[in-house]
Amino acid sequence: MRDRSRGPVSVPLTWTVLVTAALLATAACGTAAEAAPPTGAPTNAATSASITQPHSSCAGFSLSLVSDRGGRPSPVAAAEWFAGHGGVAGVPQSGWRKVGQDEGGVIVGSGDLRLHVIRGSDGTWQVDSGSWC
């Protein structure tokens, strides 16, 4: 039995994202028929956490960010960090470049993966969603 006098257990953010993504992937099985937002549509990072399949050849994810501060200095740097620490399998480590933007942020790509990156209140960048097509 754990000694509760030491306070709450701290769980690293990477594990939290990984477990959340795994649970969402399991929960999303059989829900591909649900309506998905249009490709490139901005997401509300403060409230979204889902995995979608807009059509049979694409798959995507969105993250619920804990904070809009403490990201990386550029959208490409945010994608590179996410590749190593985001907890989503199959994210390329290199080859990232800006491929577009929308009213909510910047889209960076590497191979067939596109990541949507938003700018936080402190001017740093964080990945909030992505899709493979």
Image (cartoon, grey):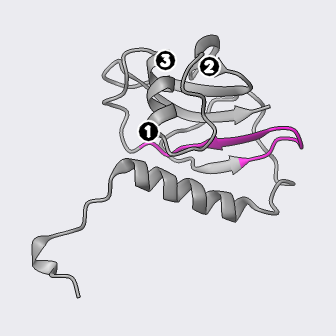
Q: Earlier in the sequence, mark 3 or mark 1?
A: 3
Question: Foreground residue, 78 or 42?
Answer: 78
Q: Identify the residue at horizontal 67%, vertical 57% (top origin).
A: 25
User: Do residues under tags 1 and 2 come within 8 Å of each other at their CB atoms?
Assistant: no
Picture quarter with the N terminus: bottom left
Camera-side residue of 66 and 14: 14
Left or right: 99, with 16 as reference point: right
Residues 74 and 121: in front is 74
Q: Position of residue 66 (x, y in %)?
A: 38, 45
Residue ID for mark 3? 75
Q: Is residue 110 left or right of residue 117?
A: right
As drawn, which residue projects farthest toward the left? 5
Name the residue type under label 2.
Ile
Give x and y (percent) for residue 2: 21, 82
Residue that carries the numbered disc 1 in the rendered image: 85
69 in relation to 106, above or below: below
**Residues at marks 3 and 1, CA–CA distance in whole angstroms:** 15 Å
Residue located beneath label 2 in the image? 107
| Quarter of the view holding residue 36 | top right
Stretch of the chain drawn in magenta? 52-65
